[in-house]
Amino acid sequence: MAAVFCFRNVIFGGACKFKSANFLLFRNLEQKQVRGCASYVGKQRSEYDYDLVVIGGGSGGLAAAKEAAANLGAKVAVLDYVTPTPIGTKWGLGGTCVNVGCIPKKLMHQAALLGEAIHDAKSYGWQVGDNVSHSWENLKDAVQAHIKSVNWVTRVELRDKKVEYINGLGTFKDQHTISVTTNKGDRLLTAKYVLIAVGGRPRYPDIPGAVEYGITSDDIFSLNRPPGKTVIVGAGYIGLECAGFLNGLGYDATVMIRSIPLRGFDQQMANIVVAEMQDKGIKFLHRCLPKSVEKLDSGRLKVTWTDSDKNEFNDEFDTVMFAIGRRALTKELHLENAGVEVAGDGEKIDAVDEQSNVPNIYAVGDVLYKKPELTPVAIHAGRLLARRLFGDSAVTMNYENVATTVFTPLEYGAVGISEETAVQRYGEDNVEIYHAYYKPTEFFIPQKNISHCYLKVVAKRDGDQKVLGMHYIGPQAGEVIQGFSAAIKCNLTVKDLMNTVGIHPTIAEEFTRINVTKRSGKDPNPASCCS
């Protein structure tokens, strides 16, 4: 065992950067050594202050920290510090998802759905007054109260699981040493392993007035005034989701699209989502770029933009929100002091099984290059990493076939690859696309628009037709697609789908009744609810 320790110290103590096959060989051997003597390592802590220091208090970092400390006996510290936004917004422990992402987004989406349901209720016999109104302040306060309760529970949980929480900004001094800046002063921590889990923050465009007068998703959920007439610059999932709930809450919403909506998603589905949002009254400015934001004497914001033909336009808004992408917070870490390399984008870490080019430094979550930027992905990867470092595990994260949902007014759920990717990867002649429009039963009585309720299955054309992707637009998309994502993990085929008996009447059963291919040219519209 002493020989093992000596070998590991040679690997971690030098400045060498292992590359290609040699690096992978040493990395795999090192992980096997750690797994083989996990209980022994847990008792030898004289060389470093901590077995693991996690930089970043978001979902992935917290998952790894709790797994390592509570279940595997490691000595762990978590560093978390939130730099305020340009307008001064900051938040507590828990990262983007809890504070300015998934959780507040879903709550505001739900508020918008409830508003729609109130109007639908009249058709079902409920006596609902005509003067239905909504209070932004009450919603904002309720959402923020819930977030603060989660912040508190998270801190208590770390204490109970014996994870040391440090509200400080961590940067690298070398590959084993972290410099921490807190309101009580600076300190140095040494760690056997370091996990980078700092996530990212929204970008601002380089135009006059953007930073001074604009906001991002970091601000919208705690905005201390009603947003009023709003323009959202950017048509990724964050931009479309925010436009959707703002419109649902009664605010005028406009989306400015530079190129295409929902880049990276199936584009047929993305365009259906946009069409549905337009039908609900959301305005879209296609192939336009903002030029400037100017604050008027009235307090309103004058936005000037140009289209693809260089024509210039302007309008006045109460709120300008930028949703043009996010940057990984790696530059603030002084990675160069530890020798950690970033990918070609200059920001993200191109890790192998979450391990950077420096063998004792790992990364999870949104800082990883070309990996899904999703909370459950970070959580699962963090837990598996902790088990490999401190437990007897060799299980690595599988980043393929991860399901996700875009919480637009009519939700879009997807798992697997898009139609475009399938055709590019396998060739058009080797891919079969099944598709169907459908009629949600709950849409009948209020006579809601069903023209955009659509789903498709992307499959290989040969044999039993292995399913490569499933895409669904309609109510409860997340709940529908979650179960099918497990089936895809188990190598679901079209034959399996067709031999599955659906639950009637549900919207999820539509996948089990799918039988029309695009290739056939047949009408994908159902004749009745039971056809």
Image (tube, helix red, strand yellow):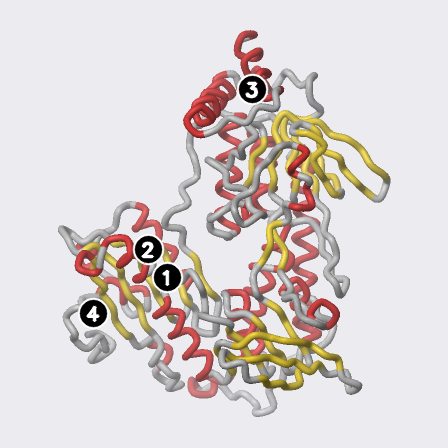
Which residue lies at the image location 31% right of the left edge and 68% below the top edge? 455
Q: Position of residue 85 (x, y in %)?
A: 72, 60
Q: Secondary structure at mark 3?
A: helix
In the image as oriented, which residue stretches furthest toward the top?
2
Q: Which sits earlier in the primary sequence, circle 3 or circle 1?
A: 3
The residue singled out by tag 4 in the image is 518
Q: Nearer the viewer, mark 3 or mark 1?
A: 3
Q: Which sits earlier in the primary sequence, circle 1 or circle 4?
A: 1
Q: Which sits earlier in the primary sequence, circle 4 or circle 3?
A: 3
Q: CA distance from mark 3 to mark 1?
A: 47 Å
Label number found at residue 480: 1
For this rendering, which residue is in front, 131 or 258? 258
Which residue lies at the image location 66% right of the left edge and 46% below the top edge? 331
Q: Is residue 118 left or right of residue 431?
A: right
Determine whether label 1 and label 2 are within 8 Å by CB: yes
The residue singled out by tag 3 in the image is 11
Q: CA distance from mark 1 to mark 2?
A: 7 Å
Residue 116 appears in the rendering: no
Q: Secondary structure at mark 4?
A: loop
Determine whether label 4 and label 3 are within 8 Å by CB: no
The residue singled out by tag 2 in the image is 484
